[in-house]
Image (tube, helix red, strand yellow):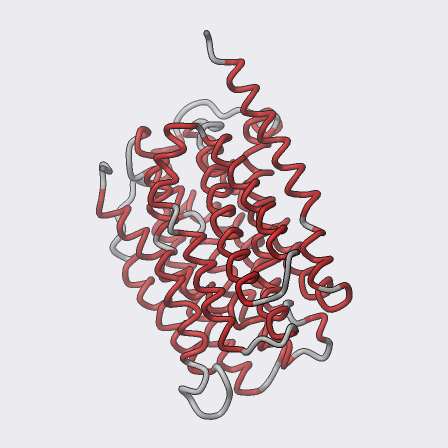
Amino acid sequence: MFRNNRNVLILAASQALMLSAIVMSMAIGGIIGGVLSPDKGLATLPIAAMVIGTAVASLPAAILMRRHGRRAGFLAGAALGVTGSLVCVLALHQTSFALFVVGHLLLGSYQGFGNYYRFAAVEATDAIHASRAISWVVAGGLVAAFVGPQLGQGGRDWIAGGLFIGSYAAQGALSLVALFLLSHVRLKPVAVQQGGEVRPLREILGQPALQASILGAAAGYAVMIMVMAATPLAMLGCGLPGTSVTPVIQWHVVGMFAPSFFTGTLITRYGAPRIMQVGFVLLLGHVAVNASGVEFLNFLSALILLGVGWNFAFVGGTALLTQTYRPAEQMKVQAVNEFAIFGLVAAATLSAGWVYDRLGWAVLNMAVLPLLLAALLVVVGIERRMRSAVPA
């Protein structure tokens, strides 16, 4: 299916390892934060720090890869992942909330570099298979649905001296494996991709399709991460046992990545804007399910919808983005895209713990509605514009 299967498979495996580490922190970071933090409203600060790290690292990652190649950047990112895990181990040993936040900032930086895996997959194959390559790399995260939450809960008591130290030690081992795999990836130097005319950034960003792709992916991601970060806290707050958190997060992540096996085909057939619209409808449906009750099945079904909706919005947005820039513009546009997406996601995550602690679960879910509706309207508009531009 791909011109260079080996590279795509390595990138998919690296994605699986990276996201297993990230999902593990998503599943238990808020719970640990609630124990270590002096204010319960700061419980999700470690997760917010992880997202901030992703946003902050996106620009230096692009610069590094432009100068020294994709592989150098990916190796640097995996090294940050190992370091972040070790810092979290130290933080748990010393019961230091501040150090725990710093560790998650470094883990987020790992993701900031790893988010370029999907763009590297596009470069590793031909244009006709670009959407499928993106989908298969994103689908590598399906492994994270099973490894991440299980690693978090399973490693809780592995090492004496502090809860969850074993989890973060194992998380660091995953990053080491990714470091090894990425050392074997062979991609065309980024400089080769840079030939041709480069338009001014203002002109590039002025394209309605590019604006819709960034807003759509950012809105879907921000809503997903905000609700996901607060869900473990909400479940425990509603009296559900801690063991019920793992399957909910697990099936949520399955919902995030399982559709990737066919999302690319759907995009090729129906177009990215249409698939993004379906994603936003599913995200709106998740709000309705969460509003209907606080039983285990409400949390489970809502987070599955949340995951599938995110997949359609994010993969669709990425596919739409790749249609808006020339080869010489790709690094610049990708960096702006990643920074914009994760800047909004960081704000959403930072507010998740505060909104839940101060205003409650119901208000948190209602708060995402304006963003979802705005993104849906923008994507509907861009589909109409694109259709009208096609000759009859």
Between residues 97 and 348, which one lies in front from this camera angle?
A: 348
Q: Is residue 391 above or below residue 367?
A: above
Residue 248, image x, y percentages: 49, 65
Residue depicted at x 47% and y 57%: 111
Direction from residue 312 to residue 98 in the image, left or right: right
User: Most extreme residue toward the top, as rendered?
Assistant: 392
User: Most extreme residue toward the bottom, as rendered?
Assistant: 160
Residue depicted at x 32% and y 52%: 12
Residue depicted at x 57% and y 38%: 216
Residue 25, image x, y percentages: 50, 69
Direction from residue 356 to residue 15 in the image, left or right: left
Q: Is residue 237 above or below residue 328?
A: below
Between residues 172 and 295, which one lies in front from this camera angle?
A: 295
The reply to whether residue 336 is visible in this rendering is no
Q: Quadrant of residue 352?
A: bottom right
Residue 327, image x, y percentages: 41, 29
The reply to whether residue 246 is visible in this rendering is yes
Q: Is residue 3 above or below residue 338?
A: above
Between residues 158 and 205, which one lies in front from this camera angle?
A: 158
Name the quarter where the N terminus is drawn. top left
Count of labels in the image: 0
User: Most extreme residue toward the right, as rendered?
Assistant: 358
Q: Quadrant of residue 213?
A: top right
Residue 46, image x, y percentages: 60, 69
Between residues 384 and 290, which one lies in front from this camera angle?
A: 290
Q: Quadrant of residue 168?
A: bottom left
